[in-house]
């Protein structure tokens, strides 16, 4: 599987963006989700399956990461 090209994706910035510390996400045509750091748009892109992304979002909403340091 080839990595997505950053310029080819429709990046969305998180609503909780503060002081430039932002996460951006984009849907990739093969059903995966791409994630990058907005401060480094040419940097690495992480890729997650739709299932992995749903599980992460559910965990975040449920507070699973509230005490992570």
Image (cartoon, rainbow, N blue to C red):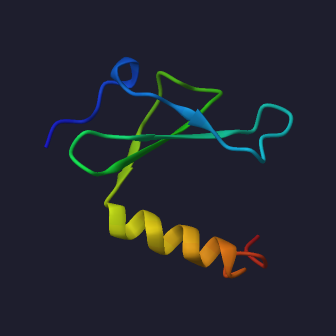
The image quarter in which residue 61 lies: bottom right
Give above or below for 61 relative to 24.
below
| Number of residue marks | 0
**Looking at the image, which residue is at 72% across and 80% down?**
63
Figure quadrant of the C terminus? bottom right
Task: Indicate the position of residue 66 as horizontal and vertical percent values.
Answer: 77, 76
38, 57: nearer the viewer: 57
Taking the image as shown, residue 56 lies to the left or right of residue 17, namely: left
The residue drawn where x is 13% and y is 43% is: 1
Q: Position of residue 30 (x, y in %)?
A: 21, 45
The location of residue 36, given as percent across then percent down, is: 51, 38
- Relative to 68, 28 lies left or right: left
Percent of width and height locating residue 48: 36, 57
- Which residue is at 39% across, 24% downward? 6
Judging depth in this view, the residue of 12 and 38 nearest the camera is: 12
Pick the front one: 41 or 8: 8
Residue extending farthest top: 7
Q: Residue at x 45, y 28 (%)?
A: 10
Dividing the picture into quadrants, the one containing residue 52 is bottom left
Q: Is residue 32 above or below residue 20?
A: below
* Furthest residue toward right: 19
20 on left or right of 39: right
């Amino acid at each position: 599987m080839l990595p997505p090209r950053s310029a080819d994706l429709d990046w969305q910035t998180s609503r909780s963006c503060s002081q430039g510390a932002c996460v951006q996400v984009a849907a990739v045509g093969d059903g995966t989700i791409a994630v990058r750091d907005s401060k480094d748009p040419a940097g690495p892109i992480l890729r997650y399956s739709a299932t992995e992304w749903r599980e992460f979002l559910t965990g975040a909403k449920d507070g699973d990461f509230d005490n992570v340091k």
